[in-house]
Amino acid sequence: MPIRLVPPAGVQRTLATAQLVGSIGDGAYYTCSALYFTRVIGMSPTRLGLGLAVAWAVGSLAGVPLGHLADRRGPRGTAVLLALATGAVVASFLVVRSFAPFLVAVCLYATTQSGLSAARQALVGGLVGRAERTTLLAQLQAVLNAGLALGAAVGGVVLSTGSRTGFLVAFAVTAVGFLVSGLILLRLPEVPPAPVSPGTGPKLAVLSDRPYAVVTLVNTVLLLRMPLLSLIIPLWIAARAEHLAWLGSALFVLNTVVVMAFQVRAARGVTGLRSASRAVRDAGVILLASCAVFALSAGDVPVWAMAGLLVVAATLQVIGEMKQSAGSWQISFDLAPAHQTGQYQGFFGSGVAVARTVGPLLLTTLLLDWGVPGWLLLGGFFLAAGCAMGPVVRWAERRRPGVAESEPEPLPEPEPVSDSGEVVARA
């Protein structure tokens, strides 16, 4: 069966269109925001880092209640409102001039982003069948990377000018991207709110679901890979071969292009909890190998050899990333009760916020200060987490009998259906 990089027409393609538009804005924001607040506004890097850490800590707490809101009020309406709110918050950055309003705005940004991610995932769960879900999420991830690349190109033009007006244009692009993305979501069919009955259990049941919490924790360890290419590797290269500083950006582009081209293929064999657990285990092994090769780049080797080692390590990392993403998507949905998808996805997605909050500080100390031993220790964490996922998932299955235990047979590609569509979060 041929691998489709573009979702079929209808609901799935609409979800992808909204994802693309929103991620273009994200790419512009991520490229320009740090330099805008430090160079244009005059905020110190320490204050900027503190503000972002506080914001993502707040965001990690917001995902569950906002996901619960999506369950109870309907994911489409909730996702639309949160997309519009995110655009409005980004627009507020245009008038931020000091730390206090920045902190408020960035906390609101992290909150709406976390809630939007949970609502979008609940929307995918409500509109797309289980057999097609992981493939769609892989396609959406590929679309996400394409949008980030386009947005980063906009950001690159802004950075080349260095003008305040250019930075403000980048924020405007981000805000408009979220607003348009929210409007595209309105084209989707409504997903009815989850029914409430006396046997439904506590409102925020995920907070007392220990097996799911452990699954989320294991996945969060694997998500520590996220700050590597964006933060650690550029600093690692600059400390050892300053004239190779350009390679950090090249490795980021490599990561983006590979995910765009191969994420769907990497997710093809993931059809249930067993195959998903194997994918995560394989990801742990590959990420260990990536860390080992990164460690080798610290040796006394020629510049060309160091560059080659970094390319190999980054390639292994993106392969591990794609496998971990595909496996974690399947696990997060299959272990979540159908009537509580939003809050469960909000809780699972909090791992991203935790990795963004804790990762930079932890990895800076572990890798930049400790060097080779730190890389090997991080690789050991990845391996342990990857191997632990299978037993933890089986424990969660035993605690929730009958939950998505069998591996469904792959279905033929669906025929195009009536127009509709948008959604998904980053792994």
Image: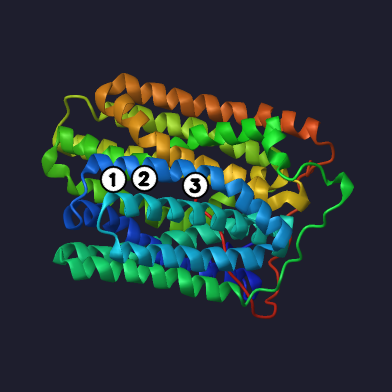
Residue that badge 3 annotates: 59
Q: Is residue 149 left or right of residue 272?
A: left
Sort mark 2 into few (<14), some (14-19) or many (20+) by Cα contacts within 10 Å. some
**What numbered label is drawn on residue 395?**
none
Residue that badge 2 annotates: 52
Q: CA distance from mark 2 to mark 3?
A: 10 Å
Q: Quadrant of the N terminus?
A: bottom right
- Residue at the extreme front of the image, as rendered: 100
Colour treatment of the image? rainbow
Residue that badge 1 annotates: 48
Is residue 3 visible to the viewer in this orientation of the structure?
yes
- Circles 1 and 2, Cβ within 8 Å, touching? The answer is yes
Residue 43 % position (x, y): 21, 49
Amino acid type, residue under disc 3 in the picture? Gly
Q: Nearer the viewer, residue 66 or 351?
A: 66
**Picture quadrant of residue 212:** top right
Q: Nearer the viewer, residue 300 or 49?
A: 49
Residue 406 % position (x, y): 79, 43
- Circles 2 and 3, Cβ within 8 Å, touching? The answer is no
Say what secondary structure mark 1 lies in.
helix
Q: Is residue 266 above or below residue 224?
A: below
Residue 276 % position (x, y): 64, 41
Q: How many marks?
A: 3
Say what secondary structure mark 3 lies in.
helix
- Residue at the extreme top of the image, as rendered: 373
Say what secondary structure mark 2 lies in.
helix
Write the residue at 76% across / 65% down. Answer: 192
